[in-house]
Amino acid sequence: MAELPVQLQPFVLEVAAAADQRVDRVGQLDFHRPGSTARTGAILFVHGGPVPADLDVLPRDWPVYTGYASAAAQRGLVGVTVDHSLIHGLDRLIDAADDVEAAIAVLRADPQVDPNRIALWFFSGAGLLAGEWLDSRPDWLRCVLLSYPRLATPPGVDELVSAAEVIGKPANSVLPVLLTRVGREREELAGPVAEFVSAGGAALDIIDVPKGQHGFDMLDHTDESRAAVTKALDWAIAHLGEDPSAQLPIPTPTSQPTSTPTTTTRPTATATAAGAPAAAGTPAGPASQQVAPATTRTQAPADQLAAESASGALTAAASSLPASASAPSVSAGADSPAARVVRREQAAYLAHDLEAFLAMYSPTAQLQLADGTVMRGRRSLREYYRPHFETGQCKTELIQRITLGEWVVDHSLVHDSDQGPTPTISLYRVQEGLIVEVRFLA
């Protein structure tokens, strides 16, 4: 009898699913559900890659991943496996990042899943996808786990956010991270893991498997392996416990819009933040940090004409937003979940903190410039915005803000030493606490 290929070797734990457990296939995801119908937390198990092109069985059906997902369901959680683009090659990293983000959206929308109690568990090559989430740390992400991860791309392959660069960065919230490290790791993987451990410091928990090899959870059927997997599952379950008391419901804004903008004054230039285009037709940046209005003053004629023109555009831009963005609220001081995210992004801009600024964006956020150019992903945003932060080009004045559901529409004047004040309309779309789309209108 032929020996089973590596990927079809059995999971190191014996997991016998209960009679009332079930598996639902939703697109590229398999939901392994517990017997109870109560709402619960969930773990997304993200396989590595690339894998041989002639595979008959895709990763979500491999015994190791169905074993992990079944074990999670046996413990009362929803365990989810997913097939993503990394199976086709490391040059598909960005596609894989998109796939994982789409999977998370489906997972969090599932009626049995508590959308604020999610864990992401990355294996092997999927470690290259983890940096984006270690960087953004959305409120709903309760913990991240990495098992024998690849943490550095080989030469010639564009990387996303490096996990080692962001694991130890200061943040307002602490994201628990668990690394399962094997003693017999391949040399090209062991070095970046060591750098990751050094950077992580106290922010990182580690489970060592001294005699384990890459893929120990399906190749090394030993007590050491079983203990390591069990301990990692226990760790994840502990961090998917009850919601922390600090996460309170956010009220839905209920104020109604006015028919025309009422702003004829603007904050002084000393109370500004976040950048849009340096000039019409050039790349734009986010609008300014909202502050309490300063002493009223009359605008110069040129500013007044620019403001009146842009205010009309603001009303038109708001009226063109999707009908689903109902229950609007208006005025620069409007407080909504989306507006709070944009204000945090703008505070980071004002502070010239590039990484804090980028952390407010979805890993695959899309930004459309005034000239129609589209940038996608934090890597592209980092490349564009870095010169702005380094040269201090972060000065705009917010004139008016409209919030409509998940949309925030800002009218700003952008100041540039060469071009003078430039009226700009900025449209932000915020979902699940992160900016997913920005459009700039010149």
Image (tube, rainbow, N blue to C red):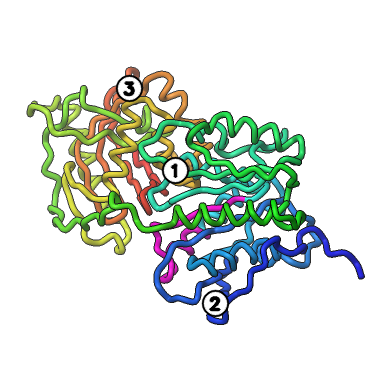
- What's the magenta region? 103-122
Circle 1 residue: 175
Spatial CA span between label 2 and label 3: 61 Å
Q: Is residue 35 shown above or below 139?
A: below
299 sits to left or right of 5: left
Q: Residue furthest front?
A: 223
Mark with earlier residue (1, 2):
2
Labels in figure, total? 3
For the residues labelled 1 and 2, the Cα–Cα distance comes to: 30 Å
Identify the amino acid type marked 3: Asp
Depth check: give the residue in front, 271 or 41. 41
**Amino acid at pointer 1:** Leu
Which of the pair 261/207 is nearer the observer?
A: 207
Residue 241 in picture, x, y percent from top left: 41, 57
Mark 1 nearby-residue class (10 Å; few <14, some 14–19, many ≥20): many
The quadrant in which residue 230 appears is bottom right
Residue pointed to by mark 3: 416
Residue 195 in view here = yes
The magenta stretch spans residue 109: yes
What residue is rendered at 48% in x and 63% in y?
A: 107
